[in-house]
Image (spheres, rainbow, N blue to C red):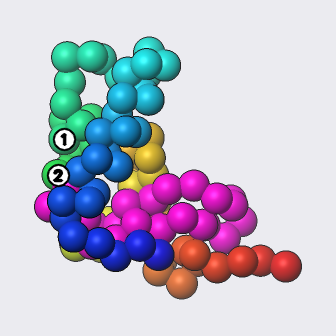
Amino acid sequence: MMYATAAAYKPMMERFWRMGVYDGLIAATSTPEEFFGFSHLDIECVHHRLAGFGAGTWFRLHDGRVFDWCARPSTPTRSIYDVTEH
């Protein structure tokens, strides 16, 4: 789990947004905030593993909601993130 200042999350959101624009998944006229539906100021932390899924990036918001790098909602159950299954 990555806790950082809000300023550190902004470039991360922009990087994933640019990847989506490049791949044609996101309209180039949108902004990262429009795509994700939240601002970098709304992010509490970033998770890098999800049990049963593996590596990735998930944004946990201060209100408890969780979204993956493609802005899809994910389960908010905190205990299944950043764990390794054997």
Q: Is residue 3 left or right of residue 77?
A: left
Give the Cα separation between the discs numbered 1 and 2.
Answer: 5 Å
Evaluate whether residue 44 shows in this view. yes
Specify the label residue 66 is tagged with. none
Instruction: Report the residue marked by disc 2.
Output: 39
Residue plotted at (36% across, 29% down) = 18
- The number of numbered badges drawn on the structure is 2
Reply above or below: 2 against 39: below
In the displayed orientation, state which residue is furthest to the right. Answer: 86
Residue plotted at (47% across, 75% down) = 1
Residue 79 in the image, given as x and y percentages of width and height: 54, 84
Circles 1 and 2 in contact, beta carbons < 8 Å: yes
- Front residue of 38/76: it is 38
- Front residue of 19/60: it is 19
Q: Which residues are magenta?
A: 40-61
Q: Is residue 3 left or right of residue 51?
A: left
Residue plotted at (58% across, 75% down) = 82
Instruction: Report the residue marked by disc 1.
Output: 33
Reply above or below: 82 against 15: below
Evaluate whether residue 76 shows in this view. no
Amino acid at circle 1: Glu
Reply above or below: 30 against 6: above
Assign the C terminus to one quadrant of the image: bottom right
Residue 58 lies in what quarter of the image? bottom left
Amino acid at circle 2: Ser
- Front residue of 62/7: it is 7
Residue 59 in the image, given as x and y percentages of width and height: 37, 60
Residue 71 in the image, given as x and y percentages of width and height: 38, 44
Q: Is residue 60 left or right of residue 10?
A: right
Residue 51 lies in what quarter of the image? bottom right
